[in-house]
Amino acid sequence: MSNRIDVKKTYKLFINGAFPRTESGRTYEIKNAKGGFIANPCLASRKDLKDAVVAARAAQSGWNKASAYNKGQILYRIAEMLEGRRAQFVDEIVGVTGVTKAKADKEVIDSVDRLVWYAGWSDKLSSLSGALNPVAGPYYNFTVPESMGVIAAIAPEMPSLLGLIDSIAPIIVGGNTVVVLASTKAPLSAMSFAEVIATSDVPAGVINILTGKKDEIAPWMASHMDIDGFDISGLGAKSHGAVRIAGAENLKRIYSFKSADPGRILAFLENKTVWHPIGL
Amino acid sequence: METPVSFDYAPAPESRSLVSIKPKYGHFIGGKFVAGSKHFPTINPATEEVLSQIALAGKADVDAAVKAARKAYTSTWSKMSGKERGKYLFRIARIMQERAREFAVLETLDNGKPIRESRDVDVPLAAAHFFYHAGWADKLEFAGLGTSTKPHGVAGQIIPWNFPLLMLAWKVAPALATGNTVVLKPAESTSLTALLFAEVCQLAELPAGVVNIVTGDGSTGALIVNHPGIDKIAFTGSTEVGKIIARAIAPTHKSVTLELGGKAANIIFEDAAIDEAIEGIVDGIFFNQGHVCCAGSRLILQENIADEVLTKLKKRMAQIRVGDPMDKNTDLGAINSKEQLLKIRELSASGDAEGAQRWSAPCDLPAKGYWFAPTIFTGVTQSHRIVREEIFGPVLSVLTFRTPREAIDKANNTPFGLSAGIWSEKGSRILWASQQLRAGVIWANTFNKFDPTSPFGGYKESGWGREGGRHGLSAYLKGVGHE
């Protein structure tokens, strides 16, 4: 048996392509299924959220401008990077949740495949939600889906990796940027996933990941005036009403989803209709 | 030297004998007209003449309407095939076309808008909305909206006073086509065409309770929004009320669509066809007295053409004929209510107070009724209230820009995002600007055009959801759009 001391990882936030600690200095403790210490992830503060939104807003127009082909390739690149690090994710999921290795492996495989599925949607959204409208007059009139802006998301507690991917990929595939709160109980795979993102050509600020408490951060997200939409799938149903009331101040689009389907992508897209006369 | 010839218009009044207005109205519940208890007057805003007494629905009336709608949904409408539902909608469209002139006269009397607009825009478009949606009723599974084509059930619909019949059509037609039944409340000041529409429902033999119309004010609207028997709310009106509704239904399972306010930018680039742009500016802000949520109320001019555009615009504005809405020559009718007139005056006064320069077209305003001359404000800044707040009247604020990027930044500098206009003869610039503008409807080299096939609705604080096209259908189907 080796006497070597492990080099353990410090789990930090992921904001604007960098890995800062929370400005608040607050952390909480993650233990394994047997009660042993694993890590001290950050308890993100309101200021961390603000920083993440600033980064997401700054990144949005550039990401939106990237071609659908380019966005699709970057999402596919995330899948490639995740595939290459499967073993690490399996170990982390097993360590934190205590599930079997086979079950953890299934979640990681599903996560990779889910990313590939979303990647393919990037250049098909206007086929799904666009239209050429036959108006009764000499006008060319079309409707196209367009990004909504900065979207916040609360990822579900479990499955912590696959749920996180469903909270990120459908939001960014259409040109939005995202600030996501990872699973509170099992945040490690989220922060390791940030390392995957950091090596996948995703521009800084497009994906920002926080760790912390839902009850603390969800109301801040709901009332933030520079967040356009909010995916509350990972938030308990009893908190939905309060979050929706707070979100009404800037008429945030707030949704909760039960599955991964194209509706999840379209929910955070606006539809723009353009008219132009036809004539000589 | 020759004496200048003056061509005056002879009055060309539409006949009001086409409509018979009852002295008093009730509600339309379960296929029948039922008497109301309290009443309030509805007036012709062009003359201040009382046209009729409108019933003010209270809790018992709204309960009865919701009950009738639920019964019709459960026993009839949800069981009927789409093919049969569609035929009722086709019938309604046809009857509205047949009685178009009557609807137009009634709309103009009650609303104050020029007969030219109610005759050529409101009523034909309302019929077109029924015709368009009629065809969807048996084709919902082909609308590309996913596998669910189930309606919500009972829809509560609250509509504004600026396009009374047209907004009714925007709400009722898609709701019925998708299999919902409705409880509709017209605006307090413009109930008459909705009550005539109730007669059309009877003539079309629409099953009792599928459409219920209760009249009243904001208190009636609140009863609808908060009614536990209603599954879906559709509202068109102010952003302020929209937010109240959003909060009210937040803890419930009600689905909602909101079409709210706007402060649209109308951008004129230096290469625009100026004479056409002048017409577009006028259509943008003076159509329907500016009582249009998507009105082009912020004119954004490239600096080097600003003087030329303003000179031509003032000349054109001086030719706008303001006055009797029943006269077929009239361009700008009456402001819909005293309350609205006071709002327009108050916000205009803030323009004066904040240092902007006001110019109004020289015109004689009638002594009776509610009127406001076509007006522009120059020398405004982006922080002025008159630039930031929706005025909902014939008042235009003028800003200038030097670079296209600056034009877009100014256009997008608003919490609203309903519509925007672009005037340029350069295709690539139009397409670039249309991508940059954060608004749901972009009119390029045109303005204020509407069609049932064309989705309408806003970004940001201009609302939730779309009306028209297949996007509009999703608002009335379960599991599609807003949960």
Image (cartoon, coloured by chain):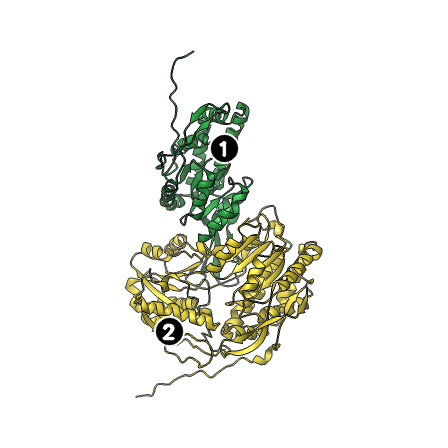
Chain colours: A green, B yellow
Q: Is B280 located above or below residue B7 in the figure?
A: above
Residue A136 visible in the picture: yes
Residue A160, disc: 1
Relative horizontal placement of residue A109, taking residue B352 as reference (left or right)? right
> What is the quadrant of residue B430 in the picture?
bottom left
Residue B316, disc: 2
Rendered residue at 55%/39% (across/down): A259
Nearest the eye: B391 or A63 = B391
Mark 2 to mark 1: distance in Å?
Answer: 64 Å
| Residue A71 image point, x, y percent | 43, 40
Badge 1: residue crowd in 10 Å (few <14, some 14–19, many ≥20):
many
Residue B442 visible in the picture: no
> Marks 2 and 1: which is nearer the front?
1
| Furthest-right residue in this view | B75
Nearest the eye: B18 or A183 = A183
> What is the quadrant of residue A85 in the picture?
top left
Rendered residue at 54%/43% (across/down): A238
| Residue A158 image point, x, y percent | 52, 33
Q: Amino acid at mark 2?
A: Arg
Q: Is B394 located above or below residue A260 in the figure?
A: below
Residue A62, disc: none
Rendered residue at 59%/61% (across/down): B172
Q: Amino acid at mark 1?
A: Ser
Secondary element type, mark 2: helix
Where, quadrant-wise, is the N terminus of chain B in this rendering?
bottom left
Please report, as a chain letter, where disc 2 is located.
B
Q: Is B115 located above or below residue B154 in the figure?
A: below
Q: Is A122 located above or below residue B39 in the figure?
A: above
| Residue B274 image point, x, y percent | 35, 66
* Pointer 2 and pointer 1 on the same chain: no
Secondary element type, mark 1: helix
